[in-house]
Each structure stands twice: as C-alpha cells, then as structure tokens.
Image (tube, helix red, strand yellow):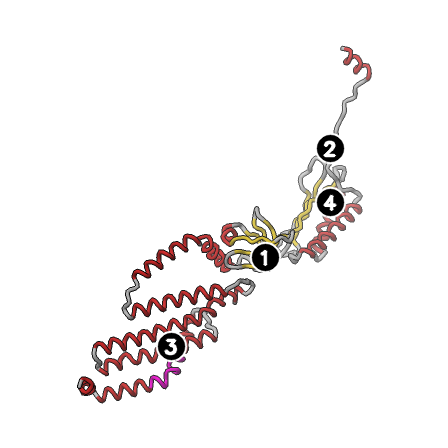
Amino acid sequence: MRFANWLASIDQTNFFLALIFIVLIWLARNVIAHWVLGLSTRLLKQLSVQLPEQVRTELAATTAILVVVLALYPVLDVLNLPDFVDGLLNRILASVAIVAVFSGWYNLSGPFVSLLRNGRFRKIHMEARWMERVAQFGVLLFAITSLLKVWQVDITGALTGVGVLGAGIAIATQDLIRNLIAGMNNMSEKRFAVGDVIQIEGVLVGTVENIDLRSTLIKGFDQIPRYVPNSDLSNAVVLNFTHRTNRRVLLSIPLVLSSSPAQITQVRDALRQYLSQSDDFELSDDAPQHVYVQALTDSAVPIIFYAWTKVPDYANSLQVNERLSLKILEVVEQAGTALAYPTQTVELAKVSVPDVISSSGS
C-alpha cells in the first residue's frame, strides 16, 4: 500500500524526464569531465601551471564520477521519496563523492611528491618514498573523518586524542620539522646543487654530494663526508664557488729598492702589455684590471697585478698563474733589476778594544 501510494505521488512526466536526464549524463560523463578538465587546464595555463598527463587522467576519472553524483541529486527531489529513504540516499551519494575525491588524491600523492624531483629541483637527489606514504596516510585519515561526519558519527573524542597525540609528536620532532622546512627553503632559493663547491663560513669547504630534506651531504677536500643539518645551512653564509664566472688573479711583485724609475716603468708596462695581449684574462668592463706601482715598503718597490681569468676552472687558473709567473721573471730580468725579498739591516756600533778593557776594569 505504501509503495502504491508512493508511485501515485510521482509525476510521471518529471520521472521520465529525470530518467532520460540521468541516462544522458551517464553516457556523456566522460565528455563533460574532459570539457571541465580542459577549462581548468586553460585557466591553470594562464598561471603558468602545467599538469602532467597522469594527473589529468586521474582528475578526469574523478570528475566523471562527480558529474554523475551531482546529476542524481535533482532526481531524488523528483522521486519524492520518504524522508528516511531520501536521507539515506543523500548520505550514500555524499559518501560516493567523498570516496571519489579522496581516492583521486590518494592516487595523485606519488605524482605530486615526485614534482619535488623535477624541474628546478632536478639536480637534487632525495628519498621521497616516505613522503608519499605520509601523504597517503593523511589522505586516508581525512577521508575516514569526512565519511564519519556524513553518517553523523561523533568522533569528537577521537579527534581530541589525535590532536593531543599530534601536538606531542610535533614537540618531539620539532628539530626534524625545522630541518624539513629549511631544506625546502634551500631548494626553493637554489643556493646550491649537487656537484657545487661551496664554503660555509667558519665551518668547512667542500663539494655537495647529496641534498635531502633533512640534511645535506658535503664532502670536504680531505674526502671526509659531513652531514650538515639544513637548518644550519639555512642560517649560514654560504659561498658558492661554482656559480662564479671568473677567478681572480692578485699578485704583488716586489722589486728591489735599488731599481731605477726606468726599470720599474719597464716592468710595469711589460706586465700591462701581457695582460691585454696574452688572451688569458677577461678584459670586459665587468672584470676590472689594474697594474700599478704601490706605495714603497721597507724592503721593496711592489707592483700590483690585479685581473680575472676568462673561466672559473681551477686547472685553467693554475696554468694562467704559471704563465704569468714565468713572464714576471722574464720581464724583471730584461729590465736589469731583481725581485726583492724581506730583509732587515742591523747596524753594530764599533767599539775599540781599550775602551772595552777600561769599561770592564771599572
């Protein structure tokens, strides 16, 4: 009798229209999902965001399910179901939507975490498997919470316990969290990458071997690996020698004090000519060059040679310095003078033997 009364209360025209609507939506669900995804992709492209193919495929499947679920809601109104049945079906539809959304997030945890190893972070090696597991656990936790909320299950006590547990874990792992955040900051700033030679002022100089979210492995020139916490790197002054474009050459060439002005000028001019014609040094305005006579010292007439090599390669700088040193010896010899070295003159007063004897007798 109740079923017959319910059938009699349904508008037959609206029922068949709703049924046709659901069939059309079911058949066109993939087309609608791809249209919605294409619109979203174009909007994201305006923000310079490119979604990978795997992400677009997963989002299309989730969107297709949501399209069908949303289309069923107006049909429930047409059916004029009893309150209990209507509420039950509404909760079922909401549960299906929640499962679809969170299952999509669960499947996309891996691709989203892998973004940290692509693009500008491609030179950074890190173990991201555990990050994927943590992300999936978080998605499952939120999904279960949302489902229980839809079915009106009181989980206030459980959430309070989880909050207290989370606070305790956060306090116990605050050093780990600080290093994780510092590692992300270091990667976003692109201060260094694997293979760079860096110097942490007052600590060490070495080559970056590995960058992880908690610590960075730096191998010193003594071949001893050091695991430096990212929080220390984030707050330290880091010199990245690999990023420099030139290497500086700074020499002070001491000539003996007995050198004549003509000899000093000859040496200086020869070094200036070598600087401009040797093809070893950068001669642009961004790389200053100076060859001048400095102020006199107690034991020499120094000439300063200041220039920059064309490339920062260390082996190249050794070759440049070698050729420059040989050239200095050559031009000094041609000028007829010599290189000075630190000397100190000690003058002894002459004392006659009778004076010494008389002084000792008194």
Whether label 1 touches label 3, CB < 8 Å: no
x then y, percent, for residue 340 = 75, 40
Residue that protrudes farthest toward the front in the picture: 1
Q: Which mark is residue 344?
A: 2
Image quarter for residue 316?
A: bottom right
Label tally: 4
Q: Which residue is mark 4?
A: 265
The residue shown at (72%, 42%) is 254
* Magenta region includes residue 326: no
Is residue 237 left or right of 143 when viewed as pictured? Answer: right
Q: Quadrant of the C terminus?
A: top right
Q: Residues within 10 Å of mark 4 (few under 14, many from 20)?
A: some
x then y, percent, for residue 110 = 47, 69
- Indicate the amino acid at tag 2: Gln
Gap between marks 1 and 2 measured at Cα: 47 Å
Q: Earlier in the sequence, mark 3 or mark 4?
A: 3
Q: Which residue is mark 3?
A: 63
Q: Is the residue 150 above or below the residue 203 in the image?
A: below
The residue shown at (78%, 11%) is 361
Image quarter for residue 314?
A: bottom right
Magenta region, residue range: 24-36
Is residue 287 left or right of 135 when viewed as pictured? Answer: right
